[in-house]
Amino acid sequence: MNKVLIVDDDIEMGESLGDVLEAQGLKIEKVTSGTAALEKIKNNGFDAALVDLKMPEMNGVETYRRIKQLAPRVKVIMMTAYSSEDLVAEARQTGELCLFKPLNIDQVLKELGAGQN
């Protein structure tokens, strides 16, 4: 995998995560909303998307569902700082991976198939 979309309304989080993943040779694009993510997914060939669960307008689970409608092959990894919310339970019901912040970067890289040598 080498083209990853980061979807997080926390701009600093997106920038930091993007910097780390780019240092591992991945091509990164960042957006701050589910709506913007869908536009990117429609027009670009992403291998994966890292999607924050808790965002205004469209939450991460809804963003996940719509990404899968547009591009079923895109691997979606959801991420959150909240462990006890209904949204986390809903995310886990999708069967997709849901990681907790702060992220374990080695785990993220492994999931993206870009583990460190």
Image: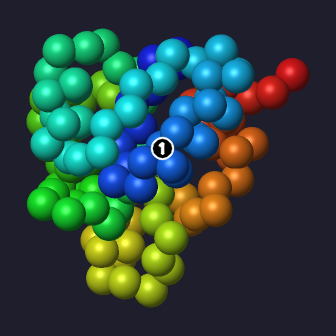
Question: Residue furthest toward the front?
Answer: 12
- Closer-to-camera residue (109/12): 12
At x 58%, y 41%, the residue is 17
At x 27%, y 62%, the residue is 55
Instruction: Judge whether residue 51 can be spotted in this image.
Output: no
Instruction: Judge whether residue 19 can be spotted in this image.
Output: yes
| Disc 1 packing (10 Å; few <14; some 14–19; many ≥20) | many
- Is residue 103 shown above or below 54? above
* Image quadrant in which you'd find residue 74: top left
* Residue topped by disc 1: 14
x, y percentage for residue 18? Answer: 55, 33
- Is residue 92 shown above or below 108? below
At x 14%, y 42%, the residue is 35
At x 31%, y 25%, the residue is 73
- Closer-to-camera residue (99/26): 26
Q: Quadrant of the C terminus?
A: top right
Question: Residue furthest toward the right?
Answer: 117
* Image quadrant in which you'd find residue 72: top left
- Is residue 85 shown above or below 9? below
